[in-house]
Amino acid sequence: MSLGTIAAIAYGILSLGGGVFGYLQAKSTPSLVSGGVSGIVLIVMGILQSQGIGWAAAVAIAITLLLVIVFIVRLAKTRKLMPAALMIAVGIVALLMMTLA
């Protein structure tokens, strides 16, 4: 399994967990839906990458980049470090791993 594949799956798990946590903590249905959908898609893309499907890497990179942008906007609006800063930092690391792998 490549580093890009591991990064996609790990960031997917983090996104999925963050969506569930946001729902449980603040009853935020948008957090559950967006975190759940993006997390599941990233996990599936990681699995597809491990099976040699090339376009899955491009989809995983696009979703990760979109999430990083969303969390940058969220951080700028709310000025709350958590969870935005964590998702930005881990997302950038994941992007580097995905693009360099």
Image (tube, rainbow, N blue to C red):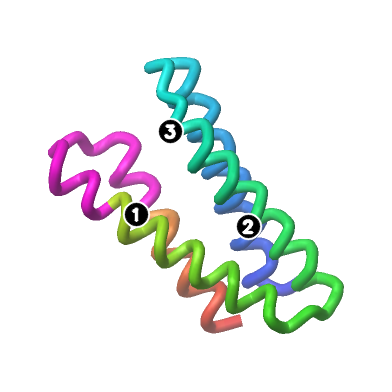
Mark 3 closeness class: few <14, some 14–19, many ≥20 residues within 10 Å: few
Q: Distance between the residues labelled 1 and 2?
A: 16 Å
Q: What residue type is labelled 1?
A: Ile
> Label 1 near label 3: C-beta < 8 Å?
no
Residue 94, position as x, y percentages in the image: 50, 64
Q: Who comes first in sequence, dot 1 or dot 2?
A: 2
Task: Look at discs 1 and 2 and give the one toward the viewer.
Answer: 2
Q: Tag on residue 88?
A: 1
Secondary structure of the residue carrying numbered label 3: helix
Q: Does the magenta stretch include residue 96?
A: no
In this rendering, is residue 93 above or below 81?
A: below
Q: Residue 30 carries which label?
A: 3
In the rendered image, residue 93, in percent from the top left (x then y), is placed at: 44, 64
User: What residue did someone put label 2 on?
Assistant: 42
Q: What is the distance, in whole Å, between disc 3 and disc 2 at their CAs?
A: 18 Å
Residue at horizontal 79 percent and vertical 68 percent from the top: 48
Amino acid bearing label 2: Leu
Say which amino acid is labelled 3.
Pro
Which residues lie in the magenta part? Answer: 72-88
Q: Position of residue 55 (x, y in %)?
A: 68, 81
Residue at the location (49% across, 42% down)? 34
The image quadrant of residue 58 is bottom right
